[in-house]
């Protein structure tokens, strides 16, 4: 993929991992594409996907060109991930790498070109999901941040903060257990999938908490009623997009 | 004690990796797989258990990479990371267990080819080095070097030009030949740079395959003779008649090639450079 106007695509050009552990001095910069990238983060059961879908409909009704991209959905890579999960081939390291491969494909194939084209790109989960999960699986914090150094920095990253028990209640309402990797069963934390989920997601929550100041995540209280959360989200997004008039598809 | 290039993967213990990790590197068409096919039975004849591995052979990602390369939409960052996934899967599930069991691991390419390809495609060298900082330092890297002039006839008169070997993803608009020359020249430059940094033992791959093989065998024998287990065994048999003597060692005698096709990236004697990696 060629990027015009002298912006070289590739690691380190668009996004700066805020890492003191990385000793080399690099030239970091936020992207200058006309589009806007908005991402939602949070553990399973935080309600982030519901909020993003409501935001999506609202933005479309306002006439913005909106595109949605989901974690782990690259047409080129997702079969490999599925294969690895099904056969339980994944270690913490290859789990991390295959997800970064998926993310790289979506970045190169859709996120970057769409931002260049002036779209509002909505991502359900972003690099912070990888940072939280991979570190919870024992990967080196600095290594994982380096791995994703090619990512575009989002305009807004919402973090839907929810207590673990609330999330578990929401998730177990309607099914009786968790999937192998979702519950972190590969880490042998507990025999029972609910207990394993609790321990694993607890680690993930504490990683998210550390990332709030590190990456300036916008925290939303995900225990509030859905309508209240959505109102807050729309307010923040509106304030941001009003400054970006070139995004309007309709007059 | 074995080392990595800086970072350790979870659960990876380095203390008991008794085997030897031997890397055959080189550009496309340099004869790497021919050499591995010659070296493996030779080592087995000497009594060593051998595992050979190479790019895209992982159960996890090999098939996915092959499928992705059939199309025309595999991006550069994606490509680099897909190969890293394949590499780490083999590192954790194949290379490390084999070394732990005392095998000799012969690998057709290692992180150096992957780094060279990524760097030539515009990736930040520091980024790709950071990813591969989890790799094990090998016991030896033999770099089969072939200039473009020597490489061209091998390609033209055997398999013809390949889309990815010609770097067609890098030079859209070129024809296969021009693209091939530009891409392979860029790779060679990068390999030469890596050769100095990682102390490759350079082997002139233009020589005929038997000569190249004899040279590799000689160097591998030197490496194996330094093996601590062998030292232990020889101490054990110190003054015993059971010590492996003339007959046993005879198979270690390899005819030296007439003109040793060897120079090292730093101009050092190649045997002295194993430890410096």
Image (cartoon, grey):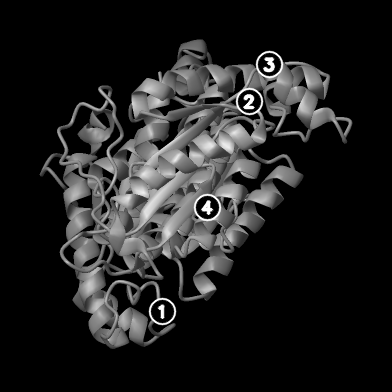
Q: Report x, y in % for residue A173.
A: 85, 31
Q: Which of the two discs, 4 and 1, sits closer to the camera?
A: 4
Q: Is residue A42 above or below residue A138?
A: below
CA distance separating discs 3 and 1: 49 Å
Quarter residue B133 falls in: top left
- Compared with B57, A222 (above or below) is above
Considering depth in this image, is B84 or A49 the residue closer to the camera?
A49
> For the residues tagged 3 and 4, is the chain the same?
yes
Picture quarter with the N terminus of chain B: top left
Of mark 3 and mark 2, the one earlier in the sequence is 3
Mark in the foreground, 3 or 1 = 3
The Cα–Cα distance between marks 3 and 4, rounded to whole angstroms, is 26 Å
Subunit bearing disc 3:
A
* Labelled pair 4, 1 in contact (Cβ < 8 Å): no
Report helix, strand or loop for mark 1. loop
Question: Relative to residue A231, is residue A118 drawn left or right?
Answer: left
Q: Horizontal and vertical percent for residue A131?
A: 47, 31
Question: What residue do we see at 51% from left, 75% from top?
Answer: B71
Q: CA distance from mark 2 to mark 1?
A: 58 Å
Where is mark 4, residue-wise?
Answer: A102
Q: Quadrant of residue B135?
A: top left
At 27% from the left and 28% from the top, the residue drawn is: B275
The chain carrying label 1 is B
Q: Which residue is mark 1?
A: B162
Q: Residue at x 38, y 83 (%)?
A: B161
Can you tell which mark lies on residue A199?
Answer: 3
Kind of element beneath mark 2? loop
- CB contact under 8 Å: marks 2 and 4: no
Judged from the image, the secondary structure of the residue bearing numbered disc 4 is: helix
| Mark 2 vs mark 4, CA separation in Å | 33 Å
Are marks 3 and 1 in one subunit?
no
């Amino acid at each position: 993929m060629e990027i015009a106007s002298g912006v070289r695509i590739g690691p380190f050009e668009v996004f700066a991992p805020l890492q003191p552990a990385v000793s080399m001095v690099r030239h970091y910069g936020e992207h200058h594409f006309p589009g806007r990238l908005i991402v939602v983060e949070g553990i399973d059961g935080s309600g982030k996907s519901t909020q993003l879908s409501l935001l999506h409909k609202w933005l479309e009704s306002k006439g913005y060109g909106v595109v949605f991209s989901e974690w782990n959905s690259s047409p080129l890579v997702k079969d490999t991930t599925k294969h690895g999960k099904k056969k339980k081939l994944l270690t913490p390291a290859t789990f991390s790498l295959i997800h970064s491969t998926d993310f790289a494909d979506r970045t190169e194939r859709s996120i970057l070109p769409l931002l260049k084209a002036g779209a509002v790109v909505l991502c359900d989960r972003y690099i912070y999901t990888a940072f939280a999960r991979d570190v919870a699986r024992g990967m080196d914090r600095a290594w994982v941040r380096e791995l994703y150094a090619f990512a575009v920095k989002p305009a807004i990253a919402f973090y839907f903060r929810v207590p673990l028990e609330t999330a578990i209640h929401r998730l177990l309402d309607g099914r009786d257990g968790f999937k192998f990797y979702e519950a972190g069963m590969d880490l042998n934390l507990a025999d029972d999938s609910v207990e394993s989920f609790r321990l694993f997601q607890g680690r993930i929550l504490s990683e998210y908490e550390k990332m709030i100041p590190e990456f300036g995540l916008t925290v939303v209280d995900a225990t509030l009623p859905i309508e209240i959360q959505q109102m807050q989200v729309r307010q923040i997004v509106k304030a941001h997009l009003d400054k970006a008039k070139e995004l309007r598809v309709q007059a | 004690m074995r080392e990595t290039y800086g970072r350790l993967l979870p659960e990876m213990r380095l203390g008991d990796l008794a085997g030897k990790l031997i890397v055959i590197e080189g550009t496309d068409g340099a004869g790497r797989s021919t050499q591995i096919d010659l070296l493996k039975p030779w080592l087995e004849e000497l009594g060593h258990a051998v595992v050979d591995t190479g790019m895209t052979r992982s159960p996890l990602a090999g098939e996915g990479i092959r499928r992705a390369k059939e199309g025309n939409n595999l991006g550069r960052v994606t490509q680099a990371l897909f190969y890293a996934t394949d590499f780490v899967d083999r590192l954790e599930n194949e290379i490390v267990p084999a070394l732990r069991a005392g095998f000799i691991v012969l690998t057709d390419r290692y992180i150096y080819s992957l780094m060279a390809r990524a760097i030539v495609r515009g990736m930040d060298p520091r980024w790709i080095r950071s990813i591969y900082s989890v790799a094990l330092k090998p016991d030896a890297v033999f770099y089969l070097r072939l200039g473009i002039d020597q490489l061209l006839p091998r390609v033209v008169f055997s398999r013809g030009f390949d889309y990815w070997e010609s770097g067609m993803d890098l030079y859209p608009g070129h024809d296969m030949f021009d693209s091939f020359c530009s891409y392979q020249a860029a790779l060679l430059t990068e390999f030469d740079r890596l050769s100095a940094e990682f102390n490759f033992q350079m082997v002139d791959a233009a020589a005929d395959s038997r000569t190249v093989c004899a040279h590799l065998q000689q160097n591998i024998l030197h490496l194996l003779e330094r093996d601590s287990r062998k030292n232990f065994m020889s101490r054990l048999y110190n003054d015993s008649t059971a010590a492996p003597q003339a007959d046993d060692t005879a198979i270690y005698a390899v005819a030296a090639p007439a003109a040793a096709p060897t120079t090292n990236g730093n101009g050092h004697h190649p045997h002295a450079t194993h430890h410096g990696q």
